[in-house]
Image: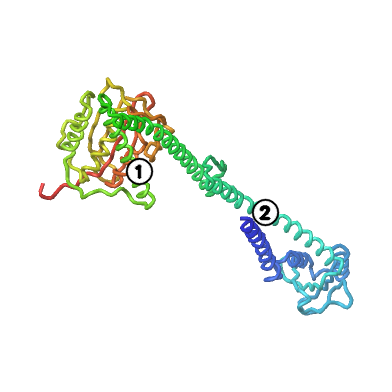
Amino acid sequence: MRRLLTRLFLINFSTFLLVSAAVLFVRWTADPGLTPLGRAREAIAMAVDAGQPPEQLQGRLELMRSRLGGHTSVYDLHGRLLASNVEPPLPPEPTSQLSRFPTYANDGTQTGWAIYGSLPDRVISETSVILALTLSVAGVLGLGLAAWATRRLVGPLLSMTEATRAIARGDFNVQLDLARSDELGSLARAFDDMTQKLARLQRSQRELLSSVSHELRTPLARMRLALTMLQDGEELGDMLPELSADVDELERMTSSVLAAAKLDLDLSRGAPIAVAARERVEVSAFVERVAARFRLAHPERELDVDLGEHPESLGALALDVAALLRACENLLDNAYRHGPADRPVRIAARRGGERGGEMIELAVIDEGPGIPAQLQELVFTPFFRVDPSRSRVTGGLGLGLAMVARIAEAHGGSVGLESTPGEGARFVIRLPAAEVSKES
């Protein structure tokens, strides 16, 4: 990175010098008449009237030499010498060392020619000093400007390099906090957002491992006790239902971890979750099927189904039925766990236009505690849980909503969340409606 800093500094400074040299070359070399000295001589020649009496003209040339320096001779249009402040007079024809400019009368007619010779050493010396000072000041300014521009460009990159090394060491609590409105500022803000999400994900995974490890101890301890009792010839009695629940819990956790591993693999490849062959299913029939499965699993909980006034107008979906059933059941299980036991869970379906095509919305609504705004974009992240605590009643591995999002994406749709803390949550799966068949 230090080499990059040096190279950028040299590039900036060299560019400044080259541009300055090019400007000077074009300004003073390409056309000498464009130089300040050439313009001054032209202006003086226009102020000189070769038609003046020779004595006045000679006095003016002497005054010019004493005040401005330089050798000048004035000729009329026929080449006859009128006045000169140098001996011998300068020849009337211009050469590489002489320059010639016309003189004019008050009415604008040309009256002769003014011939200028080389500048005296004193004037050249003074001009050289001024030029050297000018170039020195320009060089110092160029160095300062190059250093400032290079530091402004490379400084954030150096900070990002250090932050990246910190992330490689496992420290995700790094922030650049770069207050800039250019592209580097946008990159820094994206970097800070990434590190925040990585830190939350790392924290969620650590909490998950801690919770799962703690949760595993209880069923494993009961199983060990049961084995000891069996070895001693004792009857298990009332422990059998509890052991069966423990086995179910271990199986569920194992399945979730395996699903998470597959999910991570798919994400690393940039691929959505694979779905089976799709079939055409009426939306109303699918929702009723989801509701029936929920009522069978949770007969004690009320479920409201809202299909609108004309369920037949909802149309159909082309989907992997098993995958979308799992997605909807994940949402309903969330609503069941987090909503009040005395309040119903709701599932609704509607049809609407979105993204230039017809979309079907499947919504699951609960009246639970809701989700804070700053956490809503994270709920679909694998292993993320709004409540870090985990139990069989309200806990999970933080994979259900991530699976819902990936299943929706695999069907060409999306999933969204609308929630106000204290007023519940509304999860919506948006899927493209199946095209109407020509036969219908």
Would residue 29 be found to the left or right of residue 355 on screen? Answer: right
Is residue 106 in sight in this rendering? no
Is residue 117 in sight in this rendering? yes
Q: Quadrant of residue 61?
A: bottom right
Residue under the point 29% across and 34% down: 247
Would residue 309 be found to the left or right of residue 339 on screen? Answer: left
Please rate how many residues cluster around mark 2, counting C-alpha atoms within 10 Å: few if below 14, some from 14 to 19, many from 20.
Answer: some
Q: Tell me how the rendering is colored.
A: rainbow
Say which mark, if any, is on residue 395: none
What residue is pinned by disc 1? 260
Image coords of residue 19 (percent x, y): 65, 63
Q: In the displayed orientation, state which residue is furthest to the left.
A: 439
Image coords of residue 236 (percent x, y): 27, 27
Residue 170 vertical position relative to residue 112 in the rendered view, above or below: above
Q: Quadrant of residue 336?
A: top left
Q: Is mark 1 on a helix, strand or loop?
A: helix
Image coords of residue 124 (percent x, y): 83, 67
Would residue 247 be found to the left or right of residue 295 on screen? Answer: right
- Residue type, label 2: Ala
What residue is pinned by disc 2? 147
Please rate how many residues cluster around mark 1, counting C-alpha atoms within 10 Å: few if below 14, some from 14 to 19, many from 20.
Answer: many
Residue 95 vertical position relative to residue 396 in the rendered view, above or below: below
- Residue type, label 1: Ala
Q: Are marks 2 and 1 in contact (CB under 8 Å)?
A: no
Q: Is mark 2 on a helix, strand or loop?
A: helix
| Badge 2 or badge 1: first in the primary sequence | 2
Q: In the displayed orientation, state which residue is furthest to the front.
A: 232
Q: Nearer the viewer, residue 93 or 146?
A: 146
> Comparing marks 2 and 1, which lies closer to the viewer?
1
